[in-house]
């Protein structure tokens, strides 16, 4: 089922998520709903808190270049590339990279954020099997971005003071526009 995505500054997005304790059908439904929602909204990653569930659960699906499809140069998300991570922990970080990030909870806003270039993570899959993964580049960015959601933070908190101030001003205006549009429907 496609879920509603919480939009900044919804206070739930500021809350710390908790570890999953049972790898049951409820968890599987959450993961399936999150994937459906992420695909529907055109995201590459989603944390459970973004659909209002305060559990340490995130999904990532980095698009691959599709050479055969000239119409779609943005890449394709393949089902087999979907990562479902339960109770994830970053055990190692090194290097730095700057990437132009966006977030489904702050739709339409993009800004350059500095993060580690290379990470190692440990997590559990939906059945409770322990996994470990090494990531760099865009994949490492996606992991760090989604992990931040689980601690009750969003990517704009990494902006400089002046950029953050400018963002908050623009976002207030944007939200006003949105509610005006919504009330006309
Ligand atoms: Co996000």
Image (cartoon, helix red, strand yellow):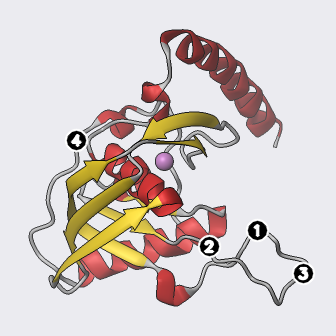
Label 4 to label 1: alpha-carbon separation: 33 Å
Is 166 situated left or right of 4 in this image?
Answer: right
Residue under label 2: 63
Q: Are marks 2 and 1 in contact (CB under 8 Å)?
A: yes
Is 12 situated left or right of 158 in this image?
Answer: left
Q: Is residue 66 above or below residue 73?
A: below
Q: Are marks 2 and 3 in contact (CB under 8 Å)?
A: no
Residue under label 1: 74
Label 2 to label 3: alpha-carbon separation: 15 Å
Most extreme residue toward the left is 21
| Label 4 SS | loop
Is 112 situated left or right of 20 in this image?
Answer: right
Q: Earlier in the sequence, mark 2 or mark 1?
A: 2
| Label 2 SS | loop
Q: Are marks 4 and 1 in contact (CB under 8 Å)?
A: no
Q: Find residue 116 and report its horizontal and vertical position in percent.
A: 38, 45
Q: Find residue 17 and report its horizontal and vertical position in percent.
A: 22, 49
Residue under label 3: 70
Is 13 situated left or right of 104 in this image?
Answer: left
Q: Does residue 1 appear anywhere in the picture? A: no
Q: Find residue 115 and report its horizontal and vertical position in percent.
A: 42, 41
**Mark in the foreground, 4 or 1:** 1
Label 2 to label 1: alpha-carbon separation: 8 Å
Q: Earlier in the sequence, mark 3 or mark 4?
A: 4
Residue under label 4: 16
Label 3 environment density (alpha carbons within 10 Å; few <14, some 14–19, many ≥20) = few
Label 2 environment density (alpha carbons within 10 Å; few <14, some 14–19, many ≥20) = some
Label 4 to label 2: alpha-carbon separation: 28 Å
């Amino acid at each position: 089922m496609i879920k509603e995505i919480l939009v900044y500054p919804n206070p739930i997005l500021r809350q710390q998520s908790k570890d999953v304790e049972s790898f049951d059908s409820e968890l599987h439904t959450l993961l399936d709903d999150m994937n459906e929602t992420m695909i529907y909204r055109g995201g590459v990653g989603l944390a459970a808190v973004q659909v209002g569930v305060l559990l340490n659960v995130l999904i990532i699906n980095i698009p691959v270049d599709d050479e055969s499809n000239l119409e779609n140069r943005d890449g394709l998300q393949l089902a087999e590339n979907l990562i479902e991570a339960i109770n994830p922990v970053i055990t190692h970080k090194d290097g730095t990279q700057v990437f132009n990030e966006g977030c489904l909870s702050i739709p339409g806003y993009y800004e350059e954020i500095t993060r580690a270039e290379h990470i190692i993570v440990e997590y559990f899959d939906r059945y409770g099997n322990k996994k470990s993964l090494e990531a760099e580049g865009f994949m490492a960015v996606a992991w760090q971005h989604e992990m931040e959601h689980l601690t009750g933070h969003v990517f704009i908190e990494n902006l400089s003071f002046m950029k953050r101030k400018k963002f908050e001003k623009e976002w207030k205006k944007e939200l006003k526009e949105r509610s005006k549009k919504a009330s006309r429907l």
